[in-house]
Amino acid sequence: MKSKINVPNVPTVPLQEAIDRVTRFRNQLIDKVPEMNIPRAVFIPIADLMAIIDKFQALDDHGNIRNSLTGVRAYFAVKETDQDLPDDITALIVPVDLAGADIVAHTNGVGGGDEEDDSDIYDFTQPCPDKCDPSSPLFVT
C-alpha cells in the first residue's frame, strides 16, 4: 500500500473555477491577438526547477540544508526570431530570494565578465501548443 505524502497547505483551485479563469483570459485577448498567438500554457520541466533549487542550496555550520530561495517567477516573453510564429510565448524563469527580489545575475568569479556568464534567467520552458494536453479541460477553445 502506498503511503500518502503530507503535502503542505497550498492553495488549489476547483476545476470549474480554473476553466472559467482560462476562458476569461482567452476572451480578453481574442479581439487583440490572433487566436493562434494566444498563449495557452507553458510546460516547465521539473528537473530544471530542481536544478535551480539545488543551485541555491547550501549546508549551514550545523550540516543542515538551507535554501536561499522563496520560489521562482515566470516572465512571459517572445523571442525576437519567433514573433510571427503561433507558439511564440515562452516564460523566462527567475529565482526569487528570501526577500522576494528577483535574482537575475550572480557573481561567482567564473568567466571573463561576460554578462551571459552570470545570468540566472532561465529559458527552458516549452510553449503550448507544442507541449499541450489537448484532452485537458483547461485546454479551452
Image (cartoon, rainbow, N blue to C red):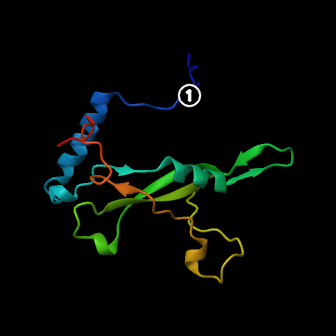
Between 56 and 99, the one lying in front of the other is: 56
What percent of the width, then of the height, locates residue 60? 81, 49
Q: Which residue is mark 1?
A: 7
Image quadrant containing the N terminus:
top right
Residue sitting at the far bottom? 112
Q: Position of residue 132 (x, y in %)?
A: 30, 47
Kindly identify the residue that appears in the image at 32 percent across and 49 percent down: 41
- The residue located at (42%, 59%) in the rendering is 75
Can see residue 123?
Answer: yes
Name the residue: 64% across, 82% down.
113
Closest to the observer: 129 or 8?
Answer: 129
**Residue 34 drawn above or below residue 67:** below
Residue most extreme to the right: 61
Q: Amino acid at mark 1?
A: Val
Q: Residue at x 37, y 56 (%)?
A: 126
Residue 15 in the image: above or below residue 129: above
31 lies left or right of 52: left
Q: Answer few, some or many: residues within 10 Å of disc 1's Cα (few below 14, many 20 plus, some between 14 and 19).
A: few
